[in-house]
Structures are given as C-alpha cells and as structure tokens.
Image (tube, rainbow, N blue to C red):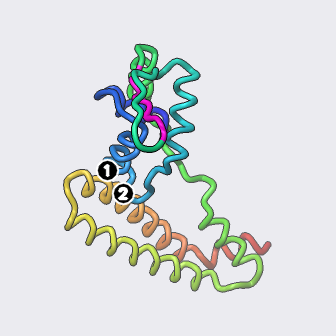
Amino acid sequence: MSISHTLLGLLEIGPRHGYDLKRAFDEKFGQDRPLHYGQVYSTMSRLLKNGLVEVEGIESGEGPERKRYAITDAGITDVESWLSTPEKPEPYLHSTLYTKLVLALLTGRDGAALLDTQRSEHLRLMRELTRRKTAGDLADQLICDHALFHLEADLRWLETAAARLDRLAAQVRS
C-alpha cells in the first residue's frame, strides 16, 4: 500500500493535522498495521517538499505546534493518477513456501510434514479471519474476504504440492 497516496487521498477529503491523518488512516486501513506517528510526519515532510501538500495553518497550544496540511492541485493530480493505474497482479513466482519445500527435500527432511504444518497454520488463520469477518463491518468483511481468497488459493497449492511431492523430490534430488 502506498502510504503517501493514502494520506494524500485522506487530505483530498479536507485539510487535517498529522494526528488526524494517523487516526483516519488507522480507522480506515490500519486495523492490523497501524501507522506510526513518525511515519506520518516523515511522509508529510516529503509530500510538502515535493509540492503535493501545503501547510494551511499552524496552531499553537499545549505541546508542539500543530501543522494543518492541505492537498495541492498537484497532489490531487497525483492521487488521480495513482487511483486510475491498475495494480500489478502478484504472480507469486518467488514463493518462500516453495523454497522451503525444495530445501526440505534437498536436505532429506520431510516435505509432507512441512506441507501439513503449513496447511494447519493456513486453516488456523482462516478460522480467525472468518470470526473477524462475522463480527466486522462491511469494510472489515471485504478485507477478510480478500485475505481468505488468497489463503484458499494457497491451500489448493498445498494440496497440489502434496499430490506431486514424490515427483518433486525425485526431480530436485537428481
């Protein structure tokens, strides 16, 4: 996820302080990985330097001064470009799981046990996401669905790999 573009998009709704940006980001996108304040302010500094945001005002009060950021026309154009550019599909051709399986087979370890352990972990996470989805709002349900669909694809791969394990072991050991 592009933190810069996400913060710019939030600013397009209206000017905000860094604290408000972090809170809005965490509420909409950061349930599992909240944004750190330092990341917000370093990103805002970079966006300011690049002319994508401007400081609309500075408020004094208890503690440090609070800058209120607003998106510029260049920032709006940048968000529009980002939103209209499709994300590159991830083909997962460099899978850590595949690498672990091949290394297990190369070193005489039990590939089937590795696949079983991974299958159990996938199923555990799928149960957790299903509980979260059941209790969540629409946004959380969509996020969970996205993750669940990827995990289902991984499970299909695990089953395929298990069915071909003997052939793979013979191939990688030759």
Towards the viewer: 112 or 74 = 74
Q: Give me the disc on residue 162.
A: none
147 in relation to 100, above or below: above
Q: Is residue 160 above or below residue 52?
A: below
Q: Which residue is mark 1?
A: 27
Instruction: Report the Cα–Cα distance between label 1 and label 2.
Output: 7 Å
Q: Is residue 167 shown in magenta?
A: no
Q: Is residue 57 visible?
A: yes
Q: Residue furthest front?
A: 62
- Identify the magenta region: 64-71
Q: Is residue 86 visible?
A: no
Q: Which structural element holds mark 1?
A: helix
Disc 2 marks which residue? 31
Picture quadrant of residue 45: top right
Mark 1 nearby-residue class (10 Å; few <14, some 14–19, many ≥20) = few
Q: Is residue 68 magenta?
A: yes
Residue 136 lies, in percent from the top left, at: 22, 61
Q: Is residue 141 above or below residue 87?
A: below
Residue in view at x 25 percent, y 64 percent:
133
In the rendered image, residue 149, in percent from the top left (x then y), is placed at 35, 59
**Label 2 element class:** loop
Residue placed furthest toward the right: 174
Q: Residues within 10 Å of mark 2 (few under 14, many from 20)?
A: few
The kind of residue on which mark 2 rests is Gln
Number of residue marks: 2
